[in-house]
Image: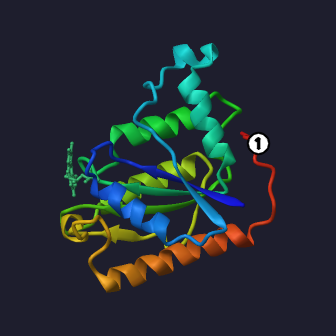
Amino acid sequence: MKKVGIIVGSLRKEAYSKKVAQNLALMLPNEIIPEFIEIGTLPLFNEDLEDQGVLEWTAFKSKITDADALLFVTPEYNRSIPGVLKNAIDVGSRPAGDNSWNGKPAMIISNSPGSIGGFGASQHLKQVALAVGMTIIQPAEVYLSRANALFAKNGLLNNDSLGRFLNQVITSLVQHILSAPATDKRSSQ
Ligand code: FNR
């Protein structure tokens, strides 16, 4: 079985980002397991603690290592990514020589109730993702605008054409995962 690690950049209970991610998870075929990877409980990164084996950091890094691909769904905060997401990326990238992100394929999706769909957050996330060695799965430009109006009361997408578009996006992620050669999932530099 292959696994996609899903990372949501918002901690808000009713986050549109979480709803987008949940809808995307439902589109995955049975042979790919979605695993939502929690980032809200990670202690803030602090180099002074690197030698102390912070349990939450270690457990988080294992989940990244274990994933065949990653799916990020993020809102935009002040034209960038939320600090909680940047913290998670910093945690996963350390200690030096044990970067859990290295070589991981990642699909990046931003969203916003506004009209430009979190474009700034997506750009910043792609920059950081590349810096820590992830590869970006196409389509690399998925910006969902008016996120507040995309869901029915039950949380499912209320818009067929968006559903078709996101199905294509997920198909690209799935093809990427299924066509990848078996890899050693251990972390590397
Ligand atoms: C925002 N919001 C926002 N929206 C946007 O399109 N561009 C931006 O730069 C910002 N900046 C921003 C900063 C901060 C601190 C907050 C709390 C919010 C609004 C944001 O898109 C909105 O709150 C979304 O609902 C957040 O996403 P989730 O939590 O619904 O996924």
**Amino acid beneath label 1:** Arg
Q: Is 94 left, or right, of 165 in this rendering?
A: right
Place of residue 143 in the rendered image (x, y in percent of width and height, measured from the top left): 34, 68
Nearest the viewer among 10 and 25 is 25
Q: How many marks?
A: 1
Place of residue 39 in the rendered image (x, y in percent of width and height, measured from the top left): 44, 38
Q: Is 166 left, or right, of 15 in this rendering?
A: right
Can you see residue 93? no
* Cβ at disc 1 under 8 Å from ligand 1: no
Applied colour scheme: rainbow
Q: Residue at x 63, y 65 (%)?
A: 32
Q: Residue at x 26, y 77 (%)?
A: 158
Q: Residue at x 81, y 60 (%)?
A: 182
Q: Is 67 left, or right, of 125 in this rendering?
A: right
Q: Which residue is mark 1?
A: 186
Q: Is 135 left, or right, of 45 in this rendering?
A: right
Q: Is residue 138 above or below residue 94?
A: below
Secondary structure type for disc 1 = loop
Give the quarter of the figure containing the C terminus.
Answer: top right
Q: Residue at x 46, y 61 (%)?
A: 108
Nearest the viewer among 154 and 103 is 154
Q: Is residue 155 above or below residue 127?
A: below
Can you see residue 24? yes
Give the quarter of the figure containing the N terminus.
Answer: bottom right
Mark 1 crowd level (few <14, some 14–19, many ≥20, 10 Å Cα)? few
Place of residue 38 in the rendered image (x, y in percent of width and height, measured from the top left): 46, 41
Query: Residue 83 occupies which quadrant of the picture?
Result: top left
Place of residue 179 in the rendered image (x, y in percent of width and height, measured from the top left): 73, 73
